Image (spheres, grey):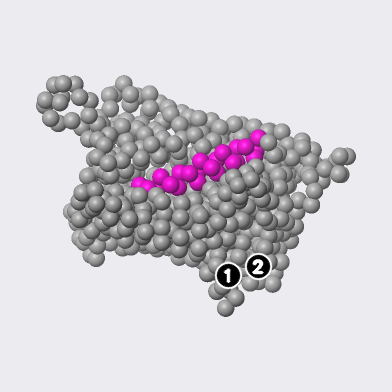
Amino acid sequence: MRTLYYIVTSALVRGLIGQGITAFVVYQGMVSLRNALGYDTTQGVYDEPSGVMAALISVIGFLLAAGVFTDWLKWIGGEDPPLKHGAQGRPEWTRYINVDVNHKVIGIQYGIASMVILLLGGLLAIIFRLELAMPGLQFLDGDAYNTLFSAHGIIMIVSIFSGIAAMINYLGPVMIGASDMSFPRLNAFSYWVSIPAATVLLSALVVGGWDTGWVAYPTHSTTTTMLGVQMFLLGFYINGFSSIASGLNMVVTTVYMRAKGMSYFRMPIFVWAAVSASILQATITQTVGLALTMVVAQRALGLEFFTPVTDPALIELGFPGGDPTLYQHLFWFYSHPAVYVWILPGLGVISELLPVFTRKPLFGYKWIALSSVGIALVGSIVWAHHMFTSGMPVTWKIPFMISTLFVAIPTGVKFFSWVATIWEGKMRFDTPMLFVLGAISVFLLGGLSGPILGTIATDMHLHDSYFVVGHFHATIFGGFVFPFFAAIYYWWPKATGKMYSEALGKLHFWIMVPGFWVMSLTQMRTGVLGMRRRIADYGPDLGIADEQALITVATLAIGWSILIMLYNLIVSLRSQEEAVPNPWGSRSPEFMSPSPLPEFNFDGPIQVIGEPYDYGLDDSTYVVPASAAGD
């Protein structure tokens, strides 16, 4: 009963109840008001303007009910409330379902959310993959299929953002010797605002769904009558506040809270990657927010941002009208760099772990650090390669093709450095290292298939084919998913104080990697053979039924391997085997402290006196307690 009480009175449950009540009250109030003003609210199952207002205000209802704004409201009232630390007299596990300002708690909250959302998105993928396993419609119609693949896309993107935030929040401050983020309350807000955003997004599945894909291109997204389209757009939009707040917080923390002696070129390489990704989050998210706002306004208020003029009289008068390609420019100006937000921390994990398991210094440390910045900068000017088939002039296409190919330069710097670091190293093939090597191989597949889509001639043939699906999955699995799993296995003993089963970890790897290679390469093959993406069926004369069945089997194998990982980690929490403070022999600052990390990370200030990756060198020290350095 006590456990049930803690759950029912938690911030999570209070927030969800508050959001539900607020949405119901606002929706009914808006419908009544619009009826009184003479508007017709009976055109569909739901009144769309009322639904939009209810969704927006329900987020505030969630945050107020959960207590996210409590300290800020006290501060406005003249009181400066102290930061609360610990479980406040409750069991320690309750911290993860309540508002907490500790960066490690927030990182774990993000991590749990990422895995839950990953399982949901993966389940949707398995459902529509079973539909595609054979020609003909088996158990889904076109609308249901469109909703499932659209939901899969955006749900997996939300999972990736949560996973990135988990790594940056948990590791960022401790790796630079800080006790927490610069703005702990803003850090908590960035997590908790993502929960009602996800709720709004998932509500789209029960109010009609949406069939626009995760890109939501006008004019289809502005004319379809599904209320679910609005909920998807609003959930996507609201989640942007989480990205912006997280990005700003990490940048400020890195600039102002580094330990004494930790110059920028003495920072762990993961921090360079995290800062590069955070700068992108803080600067480019506004553009997709603008694009989504314009679609919502066009649907709810009738503002014609994306509808071309067809009336000859208006054309003769020079009335400009709307342009659907404007949305694509705004959307991809954000969404292509967003891919680098996902993969930069993952590539940072690869660079962070390779020296540990090869027992060699990281080759070309400064070049790798600066290559993260280079990827972020060059990746921000390549967006229109997604639009080669949109009718843009060829004089625009060529510069975007060239800039796209330039991304290979800083990315190649990382690959050459990884190979040089591995060369003649004394490698240990523990589970984290296996996933690092798997990430390199899979990301190489994504990288080699990228220029094919970044070159005008080949992209014109393969655009919107299943080749794109295979390339995209290789890039994201190699750049994020495999490094994310490597990070979980690597830092799990530090976060929990428990050791997992290496045998199960390696089983996870040896099922997942072959499964992924089969899935991605076969997707590319079907694309070359003519399989289009975003369709519910294909003809038997296309000759790809065997390939589609193989993709489905590989997808199921990947799903099973992830369940093995979750079983392994959950069982380890109940294990009596305690992890040693530094099971991998790492030089990183977090491994100076006990496992799990204490509330403020370190017993006292630390000082950097050496280089971060001098593995295998005699008498080399990276960090020491500040007192030991003579402070």
Which segment did they paint magenta? Answer: 233-255
Asked if residue 323 is positioned above or below residue 631 in the image, the reply reads above
* Tag count: 2
Instruction: Quarter of the image for the N terminus: give it.
Output: bottom right
Q: Outermost residue toward the left?
A: 312
Per the model, the C-alpha gap separating discs 2 and 1 is 8 Å
* Residue 8 showing in the rendered view: yes
* Front-lying residue, 168 or 412: 168
Mark 2 element type: loop
* Front-lying residue, 99 or 381: 99
Q: Position of residue 438 (x, y in %)?
A: 52, 51
The residue where tag 1 is placed is 6
Q: Where is residue 95 in the image (x, y as percent from the top left)?
A: 61, 61
* Front-lying residue, 170 or 619: 170
Q: Is residue 558 magenta?
A: no
- Identity of the residue drawn at 60% across and 76% down: 2
Please give left or right for residue 60 compared with residue 540 in the image.
right
Name the amino acid type tagged 2: Arg
The residue where tag 2 is placed is 90
- Identity of the residue drawn at 68% across and 36% down: 256
Q: Outermost residue toward the bottom?
A: 1
Query: Do the residues bearing badges 2 and 1 touch, measured as CB atoms within 8 Å?
Result: yes
